[in-house]
């Protein structure tokens, strides 16, 4: 190569070599702005306020009463399966226990008289639940 061509190649190569470097330098401020924006979006690992405390609901204790068997064929049948009891020849949406005077009464875990129409006594939840609720407590 002749000296003129060599100097011309060097003069062109110099600015071309600087172009990518200048491009990178121009992009740096944009990258740092994105990092700052991402840091602002992060939630704080420390709570800004304390928890809201609520009093614990106190349940009244229920006396344990001796159960009595169902007698007769008047026990209600539930839509999802299962049956109630027949206490004193009356349909009982619950089970029978001995009352204070020793006679049988219908109850559902402390609710004397048993559950209302359209409900059944659930042994898992220890309460009256809608009669159509599955026996396992899960949806079909």
Image: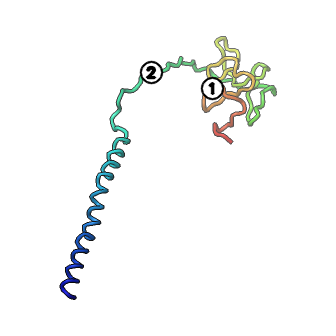
Counting from the top left corner in percent of width and height, residue 31 is at 32, 53
The answer to which of marks 2 and 1 sits earlier in the sequence is 2
Counting from the top left corner in percent of width and height, residue 26 is at 29, 57
Name, please, the residue furthest toward the left.
Answer: 3
Name, please, the residue furthest toward the right.
Answer: 73
Q: Is residue 67 above or below residue 102?
A: below
Q: Is residue 37 above or below residue 127?
A: below
In the picture, the disc for residue 54 is 2
Q: Nearer the viewer, residue 100 or 49?
A: 49
Classify residue 130 as left or right of residue 34: right
How far apart in space, not on screen, are marks 2 and 1 (Cα)?
24 Å
**SS class of the residue under badge 1?**
strand
User: Where, by quadrant of the figure, is residue 1 drawn?
Assistant: bottom left
User: Where, by quadrant of the figure, is residue 63 drawn?
Assistant: top right
Q: Nearer the viewer, residue 129 or 48?
A: 48
**How does the figure colour the protein chain or chains?**
rainbow
Name, please, the residue furthest toward the bottom.
Answer: 1
Classify residue 95 as left or right of residue 72: left
The residue wearing badge 1 is 127
Residue at horizontal 66 percent and vertical 11 percent from the top: 101
**SS class of the residue under badge 2?**
loop
Name, please, the residue furthest toward the front.
Answer: 4
Q: Is residue 8 above or below residue 25?
A: below
Residue at horizontal 37 percent and vertical 39 percent from the top: 43
**Crowd tier of the residue under label 1, counting other residues whose Cα lies within 10 Å: few below 14, some 14–19, many 20 or above:** some
Q: Quadrant of the C terminus?
A: top right
Counting from the top left corner in percent of width and height, residue 38 is at 36, 46
Residues at marks 2 and 1 touching, judged by CB atoms closer than 8 Å: no
Residue at horizontal 72 percent and vertical 30 percent from the top: 131
């Amino acid at each position: 190569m002749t000296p003129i061509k060599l100097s011309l190649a060097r003069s062109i190569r110099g600015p071309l070599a600087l172009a990518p470097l200048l491009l990178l330098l121009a992009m740096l401020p944009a990258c740092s702005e994105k990092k700052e924006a991402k840091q602002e979006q992060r939630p704080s690992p420390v709570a800004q306020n304390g928890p809201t405390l609520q009093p614990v609901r106190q349940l009244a204790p229920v006396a344990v009463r001796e159960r009595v068997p169902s007698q007769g064929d008047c026990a209600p049948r539930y839509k999802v399966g299962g049956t109630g009891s027949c206490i004193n020849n009356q349909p009982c949406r619950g089970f029978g226990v001995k009352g204070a005077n020793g006679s049988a009464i219908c109850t559902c875990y402390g609710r004397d008289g048993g559950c209302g129409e359209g409900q059944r006594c659930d042994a898992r939840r220890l309460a009256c639940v809608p009669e159509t609720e599955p026996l396992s407590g899960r949806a079909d």
